[in-house]
Image (tube, rainbow, N blue to C red):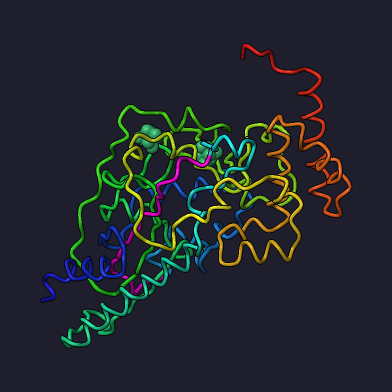
């Protein structure tokens, strides 16, 4: 039976609700060598957790073989989180001048929890397979399994590519030919030596839509994203002040940005997910900006309980909403923004002053009607 273990593992992944599963040996893939340079260039911004190093001083995310020497293979699982909703920036007429939230954050449950639960189910089934057959794992003799969602000592998308899940697009997302790029990835490190799949061929071709569409020119070269310029980073990870020159490009994004995926031709026919946890909560697809900007801690905790949006923290979310109001060109926000200029959160207050100035400027010099 164990000659066919990869097939059985893929069955376990399907049973757990994953759409895709692939297997890849632990290797020193060429793409992993780009990561230290990316960190050295500071393109990760303030995401200090990416700088974590092992005892030898190597970046943990690019040193799986040293950090987990027992690991022989990586099982990469992916689940589609697309919904039938239009793109976040395609706001319905009745919701004019509302905010934009990234598709992955519309859900009822944080994807880390939803994906980890499924990985644990795969782990359990795999352990059961090994136990019932008395299979002896080569080397240590013990079956070791460890699941991660975004937190493992590896760069998931590199392993996903070599496991055949999809190729790494110029927008740095994993793209599957059938499902597109609305995919959550989870990995299981295992001490099992498993027959690997084939890597996915690159199908971006001559397309450069994502690079051209990025409002802040964050994709500085194909597959090279400068997080410091990226709206996802700015709205979620960046604390405190957003550089003035980047604020106009942020549009009405209040959490994340999907533009480089929205424009990708491989997402045109992405099917909707069948996982109920990833269905959109209606109020979150296009939230009212003044509601977010004036949100109090208690309401933030209640509305975003179990949601990835918590990562931005209340101060960050309110700051983002204030920038979005400034970028809306809608003077109905001026009274709220003027109130927020005196806010007890100095970050919110400073961004509110900027937003008022932008709106007053646009009122004084209105855009000609033929544009
Ligand atoms: S997420 Fe948005 S800002 Fe970031 S690279 Fe993609 S299009 Fe650009
Ligand atoms: S938009 Fe084009 S270049 Fe960008 S990831 Fe998609 S296919 Fe590749």
On screen, residue 121 above or below 128: above
Q: Residue at x 74, y 63 (%)?
A: 297
The residue positioned 37% from the left and 47% from the top of the image is: 174
Judge whether residue 58 is colored magenta: no
Is the C terminus in the top left, top right, bottom left or bottom right quadrant? top right
Give residue 16's position: percent from left, percent from top: 31, 69
What percent of the width, then of the height, locates residue 33?
41, 49
Judged left or right of residue 345, residue 170 is: left
Q: Which residues are magenta?
A: 68-88
Q: Is residue 120 above or below residue 329?
A: below
Q: Residue placed farthest to the front in the image?
A: 94
Please report the residue visible at 59 percent of the width from the left and 57 percent of the height from the top: 309
Image quadrant in which you'd find residue 188: bottom left
Q: In this rendering, would 49 be left or right of 104?
A: right
Tell me residue 120's x, y (percent): 37, 75
> Residue 185's image quarter?
bottom left
Give residue 314's quadrant in the image: bottom right
Q: Residue at x 62, y 52 (%)?
A: 237
> 186 or 40: nearer the eye?
186
Please tell me whether residue 316 is drawn above or below residue 335 in the rendered image.
below
| Quarter occupied by the N terminus | bottom left
């Amino acid at each position: 039976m164990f000659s066919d273990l990869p097939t059985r593992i893929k069955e376990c992944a399907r049973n757990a609700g994953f759409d895709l599963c692939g297997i890849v040996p632990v290797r020193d893939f060429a793409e992993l060598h780009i990561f230290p340079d990316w960190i050295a260039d500071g393109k990760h911004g303030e995401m200090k957790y990416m700088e974590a190093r092992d005892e030898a001083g190597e970046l943990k995310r690019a040193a799986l073989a040293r950090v987990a020497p027992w690991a022989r293979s990586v099982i990469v699982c992916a689940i589609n989180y697309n919904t039938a909703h239009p793109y976040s920036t395609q706001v319905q007429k009745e919701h004019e001048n509302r905010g934009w939230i990234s598709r992955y954050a519309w859900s009822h449950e944080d994807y880390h929890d939803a994906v980890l639960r499924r990985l644990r189910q795969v782990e359990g089934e795999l352990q059961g397979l090994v136990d019932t057959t008395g299979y002896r794992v080569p080397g240590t003799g013990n079956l070791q399994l460890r699941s991660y969602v975004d937190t493992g000592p590896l760069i998931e998308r590199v392993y996903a590519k070599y496991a055949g899940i999809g190729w790494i697009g110029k927008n740095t997302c994993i793209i599957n030919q059938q499902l597109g790029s609305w995919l959550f990835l989870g990995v299981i490190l295992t001490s099992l030596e498993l027959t690997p799949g084939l890597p996915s061929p690159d199908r971006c071709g001559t397309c450069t839509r994502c690079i051209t569409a990025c409002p802040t020119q964050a994709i500085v070269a194909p597959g090279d994203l400068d997080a410091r310029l990226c709206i996802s980073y700015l709205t979620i990870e960046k604390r405190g002040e957003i550089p003035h020159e980047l604020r106009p490009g942020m549009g009405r994004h209040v959490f994340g940005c999907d533009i480089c995926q929205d424009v990708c031709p491989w997402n045109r026919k992405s099917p909707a997910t069948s996982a109920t946890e990833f269905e959109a909560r209606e109020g979150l697809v296009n939230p009212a900006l003044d509601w977010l900007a004036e949100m109090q801690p208690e309401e933030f905790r209640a509305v975003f309980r179990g949601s990835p949006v918590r990562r931005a923290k209340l101060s960050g979310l309110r700051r983002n909403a204030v920038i979005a109001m400034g970028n809306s060109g809608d003077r109905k926000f001026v009274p709220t923004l003027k109130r927020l200029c005196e806010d007890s959160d100095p970050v919110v207050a400073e961004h509110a002053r900027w937003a008022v100035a932008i709106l007053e400027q646009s009122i004084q010099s209105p855009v000609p009607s033929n544009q």
